[in-house]
Image (cartoon, grey):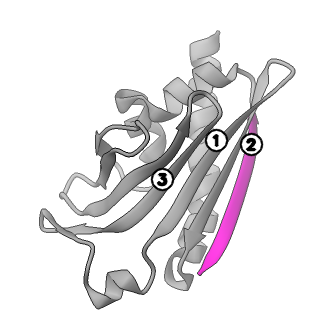
Amino acid sequence: MKTLRFTTSIAARPAVVWNTMLGAETYRAWTAEFAEGSYFEGSWDEGQKIRFLAPDGQGMVARIAQNRLHEYVSVQHLGVIKDGVEDIESESVRAWAPAYENYAFRDVGGSTEVTIEMDITPDFEEYMARTWPKALAKLKALCETRRA
């Protein structure tokens, strides 16, 4: 497994970026770059279960490993969801789980530096390397519009 890292600067305070990135409606907007209609079910609170889903019900099941308000959130991916059924035990899932996806928010003179680090298997590396920059550009636009 490899760790990918993406960073962007957003002209908004960390609280605005945090709320935009993790809010139910705005989450749908910026994650559309990964899959149109993406959404989550559950809570971003530390220790809580969260499900990341596409409109067809396929997705990922995870747990929030850490949550420091407006600073850092760590998502521990535990398995996949296929046809509405969570799989956290199959051999194919155990080959990569757990995998982490971390979001860091740092105040830099009134702007926010957002850093994404994620564990990734080789079969998704190219897709994530191509898609994360587009998703972060969408997040940046949403945050800077909300700030205005």
Amino acid type, callout 1: Ala
Tell me the SS state at disc 3. Answer: strand
What is the chief secondary structure element of the magenta stretch?
Answer: strand
Residue located beneath label 2 in the image: 8
Amino acid type, callout 2: Thr
Q: Is residue 65 left or right of residue 1?
A: left
Q: Who's the residue at 23% across and 63% down the image?
A: 58
Tell me if mark 1 has few (under 14), some (14-19) or many (20+) residues whose alpha carbon lies within 10 angstroms of its own.
Answer: some
| 1 or 12: nearer the viewer | 1
Measured as percent of width and height from the top left, residue 143 is found at: 60, 24
| 131 or 124: nearer the viewer | 124
In the image, residue 74 sits, relative to residue 95, either above or below, namely above
Tell me whether circle 1 and circle 3 mark residues in contact (CB < 8 Å).
Answer: no
Q: Which residues are magenta?
A: 1-9
In the image, residue 46 sits, relative to residue 13, either above or below, namely below
- Determine which of the numbered discs, if any, sits on residue 137 in the image: 1
| 8 or 80: nearer the viewer | 80
Q: Is residue 6 magenta?
A: yes
Q: Nearer the viewer, mark 1 or mark 3?
A: 3
Amino acid type, callout 3: Val
Q: Quadrant of the N terminus?
A: bottom right
Rounded to the nearest whole Å, what is the CA distance between mark 1 and mark 2?
Answer: 8 Å
